[in-house]
Image: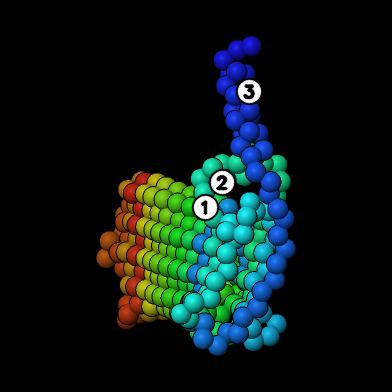
Amino acid sequence: MNVKKILLAGILVIAFGICGCGNKEKIDSNEEFSAEGISEIVLDISSWNLKVMASSDDKVHIACEGKVENDRDMQVVQKDGKLMVQQDDDTDKNLAEQFSFGEAGKIILYIPKDNAVSLSMNNGSGEMELEAVSISALSLNNQSGYVTMSDFIAESVKIKSLSGDIKITDASCTDSNINTESAYVTMKNAVIGKAAVSTDSGEVNISNINSYDSLSVETGSGDITLSHETMPDNLSCHISSGSDDVTVQLKNAEFSTDTDGCKDGSIGKGENSLSIMSNSGTVIVK
């Protein structure tokens, strides 16, 4: 037996040993809470999938389905205006789940569609989906889970992701900040006031965007693509890349700097601002 086969066999033995420890019990619970008095919902999820949807009534509903070691592995607590949902983040259990052939657990949160509640979420490897909800604020700290948001409205959005990609469709955000290390960021049909997107090595693709007050996009090595649904008529812009690979197709734009690597200019009075910068990626703005 060669070295690779020995190492693989050892890993499988360890993995099945971990998975075999303990007797996991299946849970299938549904709880509901009055939305009155709840100002913040905190979700601390290590590996389960999470979906946030609009409630069909004026209550907050939480449905959990999966396997746990004991009751402490999944807790739902309401206290001091906060509704907290926490999945145990024990490292050994997460490692066991990575080698498990079963499906990840699932949490579905239903909130009244037009609600002043704020969402604070800490996510590990689980997939996250927000659909057809309107809230006051979203704060998301994500590791490797894939995040999708659609038909989403919020005053304030702050997202930090390590490697989990982020996809936002048909959203309206007054003030948003998205920061990643290697994740890809995709936005489509978004209405924004002020937005900042930055990533070290991921790509950023923003398409069919409407009017905005301020938009800033920065990448290290990732490409940037931005397309407008309607051409801006009141904009000042700085668009650059260290790769000298910049393409800008903005109607009625007048440039004070117009080189392969940098475009500085304005449209109309130039009251709104666009800043696009990449260290070495390709940049396309149209």
Placement of the N terminus among the 4 image quadrants: top right
Q: Residues within 10 Å of mark 1 (few under 14, many from 20)?
A: some
Q: Residue at x 66, y 74 (%)?
A: 31
Q: Residue at x 56, y 46 (%)?
A: 94
Q: Position of residue 237 (x, y in %)?
A: 34, 68
Asked if disc 2 and disc 1 are in contact, CB closer than 8 Å, the reply is yes
Q: Position of residue 194 (x, y in %)?
A: 39, 74
| Residue marked by disc 3 | 9
In the rendered view, tell whether residue 158 sits above or below residue 123: below
Q: Residue at x 65, y 78 (%)?
A: 32
Is residue 104 or residue 114 the one in the foreground?
104
Q: Secondary structure at mark 1?
A: loop
Query: In the rendered structure, which disc, 2 or 1, sits on the residue that comes first in sequence?
Result: 1
Query: Is 113 left, or right, of 282 in this rendering?
Result: right
Cα distance, mark 2 to mark 3? 20 Å
| Residue marked by disc 1 | 89
